[in-house]
Image: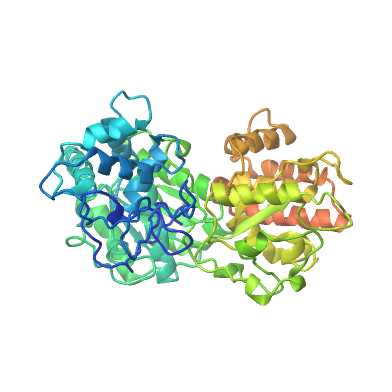
Amino acid sequence: MGAAVCNCTHGPQQPNDAQFVGAPPPASEHHHHHQEGHHKEGRHKNGHSPTGSPRSGKSPRSGKSPRSKKAQKVDEPFSREELAKTFEVVDLDASDAISTKEMALLLECMNVHYTHNSLTVLFDIIDGNHDGKVTKEEFIDYFQGKDRRKGVKELVKDIINNLKEEKNAKTGFEKDVYIVHAMSSDIIGLRRSWWLSQVLEFADLSCAGPYALRNRDGTKRVDHDGPLADMTKCGCLALLLESNSLVTEMMIGELDKAKAAGRPICTFYEAEQDAWDKLKAWRKVCPHAFETHYAISRHFLSDSEQVVLNGIHKLFGIEAAHLKNIRPPGGDFDDFSCMRMDGVKWLKPEFAYTLKRGMDYNDLPEDAFQQPDVIRTCFVSYAQEDPKSHGLSDNQLQQFRLAVKRNQLGSRVFFFEGLSLGGRSLFDDSSVCEILSLSRYIILDEMNPDVPDPLPFLQRGHNFLEALMAILTGCLAPHRDYQFEELDRALGYAVGAGTNVRKYIRENAAHPYQLVNHLCAVLRTKRFASRLECISAERLLRQALEKHPLIAQALAQITEENSSGRQFVQA
């Protein structure tokens, strides 16, 4: 699970160091920084990759080498022409202004680490009139006259490093949060640690821990600067657990050391069925580690990240920023091999663009499909407008293309129910719960009224369940402006909440049985092909919501208060 942006090989490349004036050439053209967040895979406004040619180091516009005869000497100031070209590379939507998202992309592609606060401060410094956007003139005015020998990248890093030093001087800690894990798989623990660190660092909390010595794939980091921070000199310790985590002497020692140093401990455990009960051994041996504890889930990233922010900020006695004010949920770089299931076909985007009504996977070549790996998959939800012919209409296919382009999903693999299952129903196998809760969603909810089956999108059982999961996981990839907000409100109206459905979940999670039973009751009012399909859909919804962090936390509290507990997933 994670949060930053990548400079990886999946899909068209983004701007790299060689395109930013004054930047030294990269040490290796094969060095890539993987992200745990939303991959930026789109193309530049002129139809080409914004990098030009990474191998040749050519400018994306002129085709000339950055070291051409016209280039200025290294000890001369930046020219307006050079800065204007850099601005155009960063201005991905050709709006003649750089947004905070585009500024973030600039930093990520230069491999400059930043936080929400440092991004905001940097943007405000360059945004001369403070109107929330950086125009070409403001960009040029700021960098013109600066020390050319450093380059844009180093000038930006200086600003961010100065902010970091000022913050560390105020807190007195080496780092704010020291992260450790006791996951059954070391590589999973490593990825969870990276995810947690990026959530916190984006909210201006510095992190350290053993994870920082390795990349997410387990390889040793060559860019780690300095020794590991001293845990006793960090503000708090964050412990990551799952239900089958083993209690070890080494971890007991770490927790005891934190306690002796007066460092508070915040434990985050993976929300699973009976997870709290299965952690009894931990709670008995290390009770001080559970004075502050929260359920989190890789299945519901958005709410999990907000839980993390709230929990750690509470330890420091400060108010946490709301996630929507920081960024979309991360976690796009992880192990998704669990989505490899018998009888399920994942379609490559270039073949998805050519789909026609009535096709199934037998009509496509074998190389049209690819198994999920380390990039989050995409679930395409659409209404079957013609009961006699499954597949996307021309209008739905256009919406799909817009969503892929808008969200830069060119490196993903896609699930289309009728095609990916070979005509079988989504509810034939309970294992598809993983597909529903771990995918990003493209919701094709705009329908043509002049179709054989004009039933509204959210009146259809399949579509209602899929839209609900897209909003609750926070993993919608919208194909139009404000689609997330519109669906959130529409689902809230459908469940009779009087507010958006996410707020309804937050406000009622303390009563998990009533909440889940009500959502299932609403689901049963929707149209399904059969009574059996409706029952299967309800089972899947209960199975998925059991892993929601707020519901899991409430269930843990109920279990603690009532040792007998109750089985959550009811027949």
Rendered image quadrant of residue 455:
top right
Rendered image quadrant of residue 314:
top left
In x, y percent, where is residue 122? Answer: 28, 36
The answer to which of 194 and 59 lies nearer the viewer is 59
Q: Residue at x 72, y 71 (%)?
A: 364
Rendered image quadrant of residue 511:
top right
Q: Quadrant of the C terminus?
A: bottom right
Q: How many numbered marks have been drawn onto this rendered protein structure? A: 0
The answer to which of 406 and 322 lies nearer the viewer is 406
As displayed, is residue 163 above or below residue 475?
above
In x, y percent, where is residue 52? Answer: 38, 56
Q: Residue at x 83, y 38 (%)?
A: 449
Left or right: where 183 falls relative to 56:
right
In x, y percent, where is residue 271? Answer: 54, 55
Left or right: where 26 falls relative to 286:
left
The answer to which of 310 and 479 lies nearer the viewer is 479
Q: Is residue 58 visible?
A: yes
In x, y percent, where is residue 22? Answer: 20, 50
Name the colouring of the figure. rainbow
- Outermost residue on the front side: it is 69
Q: Residue at x 61, y 67 (%)?
A: 339
The answer to which of 255 and 10 lies nearer the viewer is 10
As displayed, is residue 346 above or below residue 527?
below
Q: Is residue 273 visible?
A: no
